[in-house]
């Protein structure tokens, strides 16, 4: 199924229904589904006029805003492949993605120009929106109306996508630290949204508070798509802010919230009476992107009166498993496999293991990506006989609940973001005064894990931190620096990271 067909019951069938509340240059505004359809069709016409064709890539590097939704809807109509870029990334990280995906342009703000490789075409998001408004005969950036839809200039005819048509390339790093682009299709996103709406009973009666970044599959593939499929009302905020979050809950009165463990830890700072009042209006809190500490789950239950529903997914597969909406939400577990998805626990040779034994999780289903963009070797390594090797280690109980035990690699998950140590290590080894470097994760009560750097050499930690902060996203900057005389290694020269803390 193509995404435009999946979204049509809301965008067309609920044209007069309020769909979105968000900040615009003229203040907080509410848009109907018909407004959004009109905006998307106008923008599709502009993008087509600028030369974009099916299969072309268009990147965006934007915080949450109305225009991200416009871009997504317009590109799915045209068959253009969207390449989201984390707004926290800097030149080194952005350069790799642009060099690999080779997008026609990057939609962002002029202030990000310095982070783009030389020769990259930057389309100013404000100018692009204004051009779409002018094409529709409007005089403002956020005043599309359902009534104006009949006056909208004809965009290019909608591209007829199939389940196999690529919709997005979303980058995630492998164990080597080299970012790979997971090719997610219309069918992947459609199957994921349908499964989640069914499993979590998301309907037009819900009110969804969207604080997750739309450049991430959690916010895009789960949040945005469940909203569009269900036809519920969504409030979009630029980013999660612990000072404002409680006010959003009280003013908007959502029934549905998707978050990462760090957000739930921050929400625990609320006064008990205020938390209980918010909980009384909520239907479902969902957590993912990083393991949810059992202590946070239990304290949240006591304070808000809700058991957070924890689920399990990844960029390459979207959602794989979920604790049940009706049934036991088991602390520390991510629940059984979702509808249409098969999950098996296998040994290193790929043989299925019986329940109760720990092994690598393998996944198969319509949610699994088509492979890695222009990287056949990585695709071949990740797939076997239709199954995707997740790299996650876990165990399944006799009643089907999955519990994650960690990564096959050295992945650090901090506040819901993936950090691959080798990327930081390679950068450190290029800096003056560093002979060797190793980065590992250290438990943190708020972010789950934070990176810690072990460095051999005479470099000043403060200087190293400043240089890393200038080159990489803030969440990748080591929170602690340890100087060593030498890194512990095996006889073959491999760094024994598990011995670093003891060596320090």
Image (tube, rainbow, N blue to C red):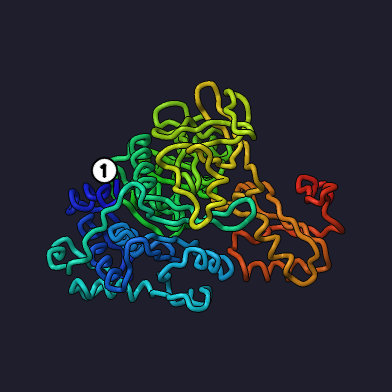
Whole-percent x, y for residue 265 in the image: 54, 46
Q: Would you say 194 lies left or right of 466 here? A: left
Q: Quadrant of residue 348?
A: top right
- x, y percent for residue 416: 54, 50
Q: Residue furthest top?
A: 398
For the question of whether residue 250 can be seen, the reply is no
Q: Is residue 209 left or right of residue 179?
A: left
> In the rendered view, would you say 42 is above or below 318?
below
Q: Residue at x 44, y 60 (%)?
A: 84
Figure check: 403 above or below 222: above
Q: Residues within 10 Å of mark 1 (few under 14, many from 20)?
A: some
Which residue: 44% across, 77% down?
Answer: 110
Quadrant containing the N terminus is top left
Which one is nearer the viewer's eye here, 288 or 249?
288
Which residue is found at the position 53% from the left and 31% from the top?
344
Residue 179 appears in which quarter of the rendering? Answer: bottom right
Q: Secondary structure at mark 1?
A: loop
Q: Is residue 271 left or right of residue 491?
A: left
Q: Which residue is mark 1?
A: 204
Q: Nearer the viewer, residue 269 or 210?
A: 210
């Amino acid at each position: 199924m193509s995404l435009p067909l999946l979204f049509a019951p809301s965008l067309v069938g609920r044209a007069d229904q309020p769909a979105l509340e968000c900040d615009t240059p003229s203040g907080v505004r509410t848009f109907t589904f018909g407004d959004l359809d009109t905006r998307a069709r106008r923008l599709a016409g502009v993008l087509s006029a600028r030369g974009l064709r099916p299969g072309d890539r268009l990147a965006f590097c934007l915080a949450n805003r109305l225009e991200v939704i416009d871009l997504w809807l317009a590109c799915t109509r045209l068959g253009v492949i969207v390449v989201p870029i984390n707004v926290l990334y800097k030149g080194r990280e952005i350069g790799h993605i642009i060099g690999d995906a080779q997008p026609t342009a990057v939609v962002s703000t002029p202030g990000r120009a310095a982070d783009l490789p030389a020769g990259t075409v930057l389309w100013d998001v404000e100018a692009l929106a204004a051009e779409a408004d002018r094409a529709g005969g409007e005089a403002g950036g956020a005043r599309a109306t359902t009534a104006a839809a009949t006056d909208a200039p004809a965009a290019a005819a909608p591209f007829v996508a199939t389940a196999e048509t690529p919709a997005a390339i979303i980058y995630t790093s492998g164990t080597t630290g080299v970012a790979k682009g997971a090719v997610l299709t219309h069918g992947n996103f459609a199957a994921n949204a349908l499964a989640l709406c069914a499993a979590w009973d998301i309907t037009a009666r819900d009110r969804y508070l969207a604080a997750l970044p739309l450049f991430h599959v959690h916010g895009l593939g789960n949040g945005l798509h469940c909203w569009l499929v269900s036809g519920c009302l969504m409030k979009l905020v630029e980013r999660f802010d612990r000072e404002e979050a409680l006010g959003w809950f009280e003013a908007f009165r959502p029934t549905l919230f998707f978050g990462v463990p760090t957000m739930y830890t921050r929400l625990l700072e609320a006064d008990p009476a205020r938390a209980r009042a918010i909980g009384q209006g909520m239907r479902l809190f969902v957590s993912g992107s990083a393991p949810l500490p059992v202590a946070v789950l239990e304290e949240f239950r006591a304070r808000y009166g809700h058991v957070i529903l924890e689920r399990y997914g990844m960029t390459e597969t979207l959602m794989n498993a979920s604790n049940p909406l009706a049934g036991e939400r088991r602390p520390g577990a991510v629940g059984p496999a979702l509808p249409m998805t098969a999950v098996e626990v296998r040994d290193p040779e790929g043989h299925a293991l019986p329940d109760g034994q720990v092994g690598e999780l393998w996944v198969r289903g319509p949610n699994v990506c088509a492979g890695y963009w222009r990287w056949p070797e990585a695709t071949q390594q990740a797939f076997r006989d239709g199954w995707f090797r997740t790299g996650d280690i876990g165990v399944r109980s006799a009643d089907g609940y999955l519990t994650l035990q960690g990564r096959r690699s050295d992945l650090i998950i901090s506040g819901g973001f993936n950090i691959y140590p080798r990327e930081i290590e390679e950068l450190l080894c290029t800096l003056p005064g560093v002979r060797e470097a190793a980065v590992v994760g250290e438990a943190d009560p708020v972010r789950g894990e934070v990176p810690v750097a072990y460095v051999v050499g005479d470099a000043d930690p403060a200087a190293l931190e400043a240089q890393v902060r200038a080159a990489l996203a803030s969440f990748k900057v080591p929170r602690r620096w340890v100087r060593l005389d030498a890194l512990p290694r095996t006889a073959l020269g491999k760094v024994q990271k598990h011995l670093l803390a003891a060596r320090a």
